[in-house]
Structures are given as structure tokens and as C-alpha cells.
Amino acid sequence: MRDFLPADKAKREHALATIRGTYAAHGFDEIETPVMEDAARLHSGLGGDNEKLAFGVLRRGLDADAVARAAASGDLASLTDLGLRFDLTVPLARFYATHRADLPVVFKSIQIAPVWRAERPQKGRYRQFMQCDIDIIGDASPLAEVELITATAATLSALGLTGLRIRINHRAILRKLVETWSIAQTDYERALITIDKEDKIGADGVVAELVELGLLDASAAPAAAADLAGLPNDGWGLLDAQEPAPWLDVEAYRQLLAIREAVAVAAPDMALVFSHNLVRGMGYYTGPIFEIEHPGLGYSLGGGGRYDGMIGRFLGTDVPATGFSIGFERIVDLIEVPAQAASDAVVLVHDADAPPSALIAVKTELVASGKRVRLERRTKNVKALLERAAESGYGSFAFVTAATASADQLEFKPLTARH
């Protein structure tokens, strides 16, 4: 968990304002949910490995004996009834189930808020971090994915990020692929974790690991290797042949083609690339899945997918849903903040004997004219004071004395930041 100095905070707020404004322009409405959720909900199996990283909140009224009994029995979960949210998707599902009667048939939400995970702190991994999610609930058509992807592409462009591409796949294609290799249904998720490693260990490495784990029969290894070798990781030619490969879910692939065609109209600069080994770690995905890729980075800048089965866990009735999350903490490090109009930011350096009423009157006059104004008491090292002000984005300064009665009497001089 981190502190942010003014310059860092200003950069983050600039990014957040850009994200909010762009998403809102694409028809999404912002909601807010509590930082804590019911512990049983957070540990309902929807959050994957993230559930193991949830911070729990102890029940009120616990005594030392109750804690000792729970520790002795290994039932530490009984000590908590609430927990800090580890993502925004589980809270959204609960929110929709609670407020469905007050929401439109197709609900398009923005959630931008901090989440907490008990990570082992290291570069790029924090215990508190910001998530920026958009979700569409109630639309089962590919239009929902198209809207998510185009809104995200517009947001990344507004932030000044270029050269990105979005990898896309479909869980149905992945399921049919492992079915073709006669992998047991109970082992699908373990097999997909291995397929996700293909970019690092290659097709042969994937097959070898599946055999080593006992998920794939050794006699089926050559056919599985041939299947992977025939899957493009940067193209769309799977329906060009007269007979599609037996492992290809044609309907799912056509959904991806339709999404690609529509995205090309609205976001022609955002490449959409079919990636057969894109898996995404969350087991609740049911349809298209996608991930933002930066050519110079070894990690994604966000991702998401369709999760049609999640809301039904809370509501009792399945509702189609799909979402996209951008990795705010990674993206904010890549962007540049446009320089503020320094001419609108001024510093008033005043003498110690200048009356507060006169200082505030001059400051109020300047603020009313649209200026950003900072009052600073004159120090022995005025040069250092002015250099810090310039680095904070102030463009000019003026000295204020006890005799200054109005802003018209001020003589402003330019400020120059150190380089």
C-alpha cells in the first residue's frame, strides 16, 4: 500500500478523469459498491486464486477462547464474516442481483475503485490498487463485446497509448480443443493453465507437460502437437480450408470474426488478433475472452471476457454478462500528463507582516479570474521556493507586501522549472 506525492497524485487523477470521461461518452454509467462484502460471497468460488488473497474482517465480539478454538480446529474462516473486496466483478454481481428492478434491461456499468489483496509486495504487485472496469449485463449478443472493446480502445487512445493490440479467444474453442485430446472434463482447467504457457515453453513443451501431469495420454501427444502447430497465434485463417479442423468450434470462431469486423469499423487503429493460447485465469469465463498486449512489455495491460453464469449464483436466474478491466497501475506508469497552462497558475510570495485579510482579498480576486493561486511566505532562500513552485506547475510569481491592496498592483514574473 503506497503514498502518492502531489505530482504522482495529479498524474493518477488525470488518467482517472480521462478514463471516466471516455467510458461515459460510450454510454456507461458509474456505480459505487462498499469496500467490504460478505465473506461467504467473497469465498463462493467465483474469484479463483484471488479468494486466497482476500483480507478478512474479524467478527465483532470475539473473545480469546473463540479465537483459540478456531485456531486449534483449523477453522479460521469462522472468525470472519466480512472481507475487503479483491476485485470489482463479485461486488458487481451482488449489486446487480440486489438492484435489478431499478436498472435497465441492458445495464452498462463503470466501476473505478481500489481493491485489496494480500499479495507478497513486489514491483507491479500491491496490496491496494485501483481497478477500472466496464461491464455490460443483460446482452447475450456479440455487440456487448464490441462495445467493451471499442470503448476500451478509445480510452487507451485518449490516454496517449499507441501500438497496442487486443488478443482474443473463446472458451468454447479451448474446451473443444482439450475435448479432442480426450482430456477428462474434470481436468479442463488444469490443462488450460498449461496451454496458457505456450508462448514461453512452445507447443512441444505444452504437450510434454500435459503428458507429465497425467492429463494427456502419451499416444495422443503427436496429434495434440500437430493441432497446436496448426493454430495461428496472430491470424484469422481457420475457416479458409474447405473442411474446418475437427477441434475448432466453428460457431464460437464466427462470433470472434463478427466482433473483429465490427471493431475494425469503430477502432481501425486497434488490431484484434486471434490467439488460440489465450486462456485468462478466471474459471467463470464462458465465452469470448480478451487481453490488451503492449509490444514492449512482457505482461498484459488489462483484459476480460464473458461470464454468463456468475450473476445467476446470486440471483437464481442466469443473466448474460461480459466485462473489460484495464490495468490502471500499469497504464499510469506509461502515460504522460499534458502540461498545465502555467500562465493560469501563480505564486504570491508575501512578507510576514502582510495582513491575512489583504492576502486573502488579493488571492480571492485572482481565483475569481480563473487563476490557480498559491500563497507562500517569503523565506531567506526565495530561489529554492520558486524552483519548487515551478516544478509543481506554477508559471509566474509576484511579491505581495503590506501595502498591496489589489491584484492590479502585482508585477508578475515568469517561473522556470529546473531540468
Image (spheres, grey):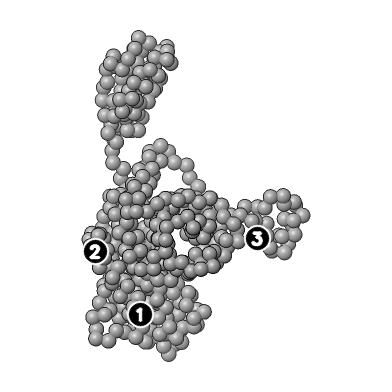
Quadrant housing residue 379: top left
Determine whether 252 is above or below 346 in the image. below
How packed mark 2 is, by other alpha carbons closer than 10 Å (few <14, some 14-19, many 20 or more), is: some
Report the number of discs: 3
Residue at point 43%, 16% (across, down): 356
CA distance for labels 1 and 2:
23 Å
Kind of residue at badge 2:
Ala
Q: At numbered mark 3, what does the secondary structure look like: helix, strand or loop?
A: helix
Residue at point 38%, 43% (across, down): 13
Across and down, in percent, residue 80 comes to: 65, 56
CA distance for labels 1 and 3:
41 Å
Name the outermost residue toward the bottom: 219
Q: Find residue 77 and name its label.
A: 3
Dividing the image into 4 quarters, which one contains the C terminus? top left
Kind of residue at badge 3:
Ala
Q: Find residue 264 and name its label.
A: 2
Sequence-wise, the earlier of marks 1 and 2 is: 1
Kind of residue at badge 1:
Asp
How packed mark 1 is, by other alpha carbons closer than 10 Å (few <14, some 14-19, many 20 or more), is: some
Can see residue 119?
A: no
Across and down, in percent, residue 86 comes to: 51, 56
Q: Find residue 249 and name its label.
A: 1
Sequence-wise, the earlier of marks 1 and 3 is: 3
Quadrant housing residue 176: bottom left
Sequence-wise, the earlier of marks 2 and 3 is: 3
Q: At numbered mark 2, what does the secondary structure look like: helix, strand or loop?
A: helix
* Left or right of residue 72: residue 406: left
Name the outermost residue toward the top: 403
